[in-house]
Amino acid sequence: IAFHNDVNTIRAYKITATNPPAITFAWSMSQTGRGSPWVTTTDGTNNTIVWVAGVAGDQRLHAYDGDTGAVIYAGGGANELMTGTRQWNTGITARGRIYFDADNKVYAFKLPTPTPTPTATATATPTATPGPITLTARGKRIGGINTSRLKWRRATSANIDVYRDGVVIATTPNDGLYDDSTGTTGHVSFTYKVCEAGTQTCSNEATVTF
Protein backbone atom coordinates (compact mmCIF):
# COMPACT_ATOMS: atom_id res chain seq x y z
CA ILE A 1 0.00 0.00 0.00
CA ALA A 2 1.39 3.44 -0.91
CA PHE A 3 0.28 6.97 -0.04
CA HIS A 4 1.48 10.43 -1.12
CA ASN A 5 1.14 12.94 1.73
CA ASP A 6 1.04 16.75 1.83
CA VAL A 7 4.74 17.10 2.70
CA ASN A 8 5.98 15.67 -0.60
CA THR A 9 6.68 12.19 0.71
CA ILE A 10 5.60 8.76 -0.49
CA ARG A 11 5.08 6.26 2.32
CA ALA A 12 4.72 2.54 1.68
CA TYR A 13 3.25 -0.12 3.98
CA LYS A 14 3.28 -3.91 3.82
CA ILE A 15 0.35 -6.21 4.54
CA THR A 16 1.64 -9.19 6.51
CA ALA A 17 0.72 -12.82 5.84
CA THR A 18 -0.48 -13.28 9.42
CA ASN A 19 -4.02 -14.17 10.44
CA PRO A 20 -5.51 -11.67 10.86
CA PRO A 21 -3.33 -9.56 8.52
CA ALA A 22 -1.48 -6.56 9.90
CA ILE A 23 -0.05 -3.46 8.22
CA THR A 24 3.57 -2.46 8.89
CA PHE A 25 5.59 0.54 7.70
CA ALA A 26 8.00 -0.34 4.86
CA TRP A 27 9.76 2.84 3.67
CA SER A 28 9.35 6.50 2.76
CA MET A 29 10.78 8.53 -0.13
CA SER A 30 10.86 12.26 -0.85
CA GLN A 31 8.81 12.99 -3.99
CA THR A 32 7.66 16.43 -5.18
CA GLY A 33 4.09 16.94 -6.31
CA ARG A 34 0.86 15.33 -5.14
CA GLY A 35 0.21 12.54 -7.62
CA SER A 36 -1.70 9.45 -6.53
CA PRO A 37 0.63 6.41 -6.45
CA TRP A 38 -0.32 3.02 -7.82
CA VAL A 39 1.29 -0.40 -7.45
CA THR A 40 2.10 -3.10 -10.01
CA THR A 41 3.34 -6.68 -9.67
CA THR A 42 4.19 -9.41 -12.16
CA ASP A 43 1.91 -12.02 -10.57
CA GLY A 44 0.01 -10.29 -7.79
CA THR A 45 2.80 -10.87 -5.26
CA ASN A 46 6.32 -10.54 -6.70
CA ASN A 47 8.33 -7.69 -8.24
CA THR A 48 6.26 -4.99 -6.57
CA ILE A 49 6.77 -1.49 -7.99
CA VAL A 50 5.26 1.75 -6.68
CA TRP A 51 4.60 4.28 -9.48
CA VAL A 52 3.79 7.97 -9.12
CA ALA A 53 3.76 11.03 -11.39
CA GLY A 54 5.28 14.27 -10.14
CA VAL A 55 1.96 16.12 -10.38
CA ALA A 56 2.46 19.86 -9.78
CA GLY A 57 6.13 18.97 -9.31
CA ASP A 58 8.55 17.82 -12.00
CA GLN A 59 5.70 16.26 -14.09
CA ARG A 60 7.67 13.08 -14.66
CA LEU A 61 6.95 9.42 -14.01
CA HIS A 62 8.82 7.85 -11.08
CA ALA A 63 9.07 4.25 -9.87
CA TYR A 64 10.31 2.73 -6.61
CA ASP A 65 11.01 -0.82 -5.50
CA GLY A 66 7.99 -1.85 -3.46
CA ASP A 67 10.09 -3.73 -0.88
CA THR A 68 12.99 -1.32 -0.34
CA GLY A 69 12.02 2.06 -1.82
CA ALA A 70 15.08 1.99 -4.10
CA VAL A 71 14.69 4.19 -7.18
CA ILE A 72 13.85 2.11 -10.26
CA TYR A 73 12.95 4.93 -12.65
CA ALA A 74 13.82 8.58 -12.04
CA GLY A 75 11.79 10.42 -14.67
CA GLY A 76 13.77 9.90 -17.87
CA GLY A 77 14.96 12.59 -20.26
CA ALA A 78 13.42 15.29 -22.46
CA ASN A 79 11.07 12.86 -24.23
CA GLU A 80 9.53 11.69 -20.95
CA LEU A 81 8.47 15.13 -19.63
CA MET A 82 4.67 15.45 -19.34
CA THR A 83 2.57 18.63 -19.18
CA GLY A 84 -0.67 19.55 -17.48
CA THR A 85 -0.63 16.75 -14.89
CA ARG A 86 -3.30 16.90 -12.19
CA GLN A 87 -3.38 15.28 -8.75
CA TRP A 88 -6.61 13.41 -9.51
CA ASN A 89 -5.01 11.62 -12.49
CA THR A 90 -3.70 8.10 -11.83
CA GLY A 91 -1.75 5.95 -14.25
CA ILE A 92 -2.80 2.51 -15.40
CA THR A 93 -0.78 -0.49 -16.54
CA ALA A 94 -1.74 -2.78 -19.41
CA ARG A 95 0.16 -5.15 -21.70
CA GLY A 96 3.62 -4.01 -20.69
CA ARG A 97 2.93 -0.26 -20.76
CA ILE A 98 2.20 2.54 -18.31
CA TYR A 99 -0.48 5.01 -19.46
CA PHE A 100 -1.00 8.44 -17.90
CA ASP A 101 -3.70 10.90 -18.93
CA ALA A 102 -2.82 14.62 -18.69
CA ASP A 103 -3.57 17.85 -20.54
CA ASN A 104 -5.91 16.15 -23.06
CA LYS A 105 -3.20 13.65 -23.94
CA VAL A 106 -2.38 10.07 -23.02
CA TYR A 107 1.30 9.44 -22.34
CA ALA A 108 2.49 5.85 -22.88
CA PHE A 109 5.66 4.42 -21.34
CA LYS A 110 6.92 1.06 -22.56
CA LEU A 111 8.23 -1.50 -20.08
CA PRO A 112 11.12 -3.37 -21.70
CA THR A 113 11.50 -7.08 -20.94
CA PRO A 114 12.78 -8.31 -18.56
CA THR A 115 13.78 -5.12 -16.72
CA PRO A 116 10.69 -3.09 -15.68
CA THR A 117 12.21 0.31 -16.48
CA PRO A 118 9.91 2.54 -18.55
CA THR A 119 11.37 4.45 -21.48
CA ALA A 120 9.81 6.35 -24.34
CA THR A 121 12.78 5.87 -26.67
CA ALA A 122 15.01 2.87 -27.23
CA THR A 123 18.64 3.67 -26.45
CA ALA A 124 21.67 1.43 -26.21
CA THR A 125 23.41 1.44 -22.83
CA PRO A 126 27.17 0.84 -22.99
CA THR A 127 28.64 -1.64 -20.56
CA ALA A 128 30.68 0.00 -17.84
CA THR A 129 34.38 -0.81 -17.98
CA PRO A 130 35.85 -1.46 -14.54
CA GLY A 131 38.70 0.98 -14.00
CA PRO A 132 41.33 1.64 -11.38
CA ILE A 133 38.98 3.79 -9.29
CA THR A 134 38.25 2.40 -5.83
CA LEU A 135 35.07 3.42 -4.01
CA THR A 136 33.97 3.07 -0.39
CA ALA A 137 30.59 4.13 1.01
CA ARG A 138 28.99 4.35 4.43
CA GLY A 139 25.61 5.57 5.66
CA LYS A 140 24.61 7.99 8.38
CA ARG A 141 21.54 10.06 9.26
CA ILE A 142 21.78 13.83 9.04
CA GLY A 143 18.74 15.67 10.34
CA GLY A 144 16.87 12.37 10.24
CA ILE A 145 17.57 11.88 6.51
CA ASN A 146 19.48 8.84 5.23
CA THR A 147 22.76 10.20 3.85
CA SER A 148 25.49 8.22 2.08
CA ARG A 149 29.12 9.38 2.25
CA LEU A 150 31.16 8.27 -0.76
CA LYS A 151 34.94 8.30 -0.95
CA TRP A 152 37.03 7.31 -3.97
CA ARG A 153 40.67 7.16 -5.07
CA ARG A 154 42.65 6.98 -8.33
CA ALA A 155 40.21 8.91 -10.54
CA THR A 156 42.04 11.17 -13.00
CA SER A 157 39.33 13.30 -14.69
CA ALA A 158 38.37 16.80 -13.54
CA ASN A 159 34.80 15.72 -12.76
CA ILE A 160 33.09 12.54 -11.58
CA ASP A 161 29.65 11.11 -12.39
CA VAL A 162 27.98 9.67 -9.30
CA TYR A 163 25.59 6.75 -9.90
CA ARG A 164 22.92 5.53 -7.46
CA ASP A 165 21.15 2.31 -8.42
CA GLY A 166 22.36 2.68 -12.01
CA VAL A 167 21.20 6.31 -12.48
CA VAL A 168 23.48 9.37 -12.57
CA ILE A 169 22.44 11.59 -9.66
CA ALA A 170 25.28 14.14 -9.77
CA THR A 171 28.39 15.30 -11.57
CA THR A 172 30.84 16.61 -9.02
CA PRO A 173 34.45 17.85 -8.93
CA ASN A 174 36.99 15.06 -8.50
CA ASP A 175 37.88 15.79 -4.90
CA GLY A 176 37.39 12.21 -3.70
CA LEU A 177 34.33 12.90 -1.55
CA TYR A 178 30.55 13.19 -2.07
CA ASP A 179 27.61 13.17 0.37
CA ASP A 180 24.30 11.93 -1.05
CA SER A 181 21.25 13.10 0.92
CA THR A 182 18.80 10.46 -0.32
CA GLY A 183 15.61 12.07 0.97
CA THR A 184 14.61 8.79 2.66
CA THR A 185 14.10 8.04 6.33
CA GLY A 186 13.22 4.35 6.53
CA HIS A 187 15.00 1.05 5.96
CA VAL A 188 16.43 1.07 2.44
CA SER A 189 19.55 0.09 0.48
CA PHE A 190 21.36 1.96 -2.30
CA THR A 191 24.15 0.79 -4.61
CA TYR A 192 26.70 3.34 -5.80
CA LYS A 193 29.52 3.65 -8.29
CA VAL A 194 31.52 6.61 -9.61
CA CYS A 195 32.85 7.07 -13.14
CA GLU A 196 35.16 9.44 -14.95
CA ALA A 197 32.67 12.09 -16.15
CA GLY A 198 31.14 11.24 -19.52
CA THR A 199 32.87 7.85 -19.73
CA GLN A 200 32.32 4.26 -18.68
CA THR A 201 35.60 4.09 -16.73
CA CYS A 202 34.09 3.32 -13.37
CA SER A 203 34.81 2.19 -9.84
CA ASN A 204 33.65 -0.90 -8.04
CA GLU A 205 30.08 -0.86 -6.73
CA ALA A 206 29.45 -0.12 -3.04
CA THR A 207 26.17 -0.72 -1.20
CA VAL A 208 24.85 1.32 1.73
CA THR A 209 22.05 -0.11 3.88
CA PHE A 210 20.08 2.00 6.36
Image: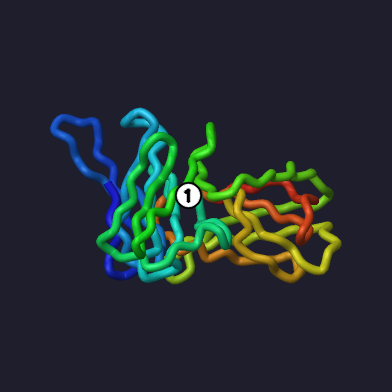
Given residues 24 and 71, the one toward you in this image is 71
Q: Nearer the viewer, residue 98 or 193?
A: 98
Q: Secondary structure at mark 1?
A: loop
In the visual, does 52 lie left or right of 157?
A: left
| Res. 183 image quadrant | bottom left
For this view, does 197 lie left or right of residue 167? right
Across and down, in percent, residue 78 comes to 57, 62
Q: Amino acid at mark 1?
A: Ala
Q: Residue at x 79, y 44 (%)?
A: 129
- Judging depth in this view, the residue of 26 and 94 nearest the camera is 94
Relative horizontal placement of residue 122, taking residue 27 as reference (left or right): right
Residue 185 vertical placement versus 114 (above, below): below
Residue occupying the far right of the picture:
156
Q: Residue at x 63, y 58 (%)?
A: 168
Q: State whether residue 58 appears in this view.
A: yes
Q: Is residue 30 above or below residue 129?
A: below
Measured as percent of width and height from the top left, residue 36 is found at 29, 57
Q: Which residue is mark 1?
A: 70
Q: State the image coordinates of residue 47 (x, y, percent, origin top left).
A: 42, 35
Colour setup of the view? rainbow
Label 1 CA crowd tier, 10 Å (few <14, some 14–19, many 20+): many
**Rendered residue at 83%/49% (across/down):** 132
Residue 14 lies, in percent from the top left, at 28, 42
Badge count = 1
The structure residue drawn at horizontal position 60% and vertical position 61%, both measured from the top left corner, is: 169
Residue lying farthest to the left in this orientation: 20
Q: Report whether residue 209 is seen.
A: no
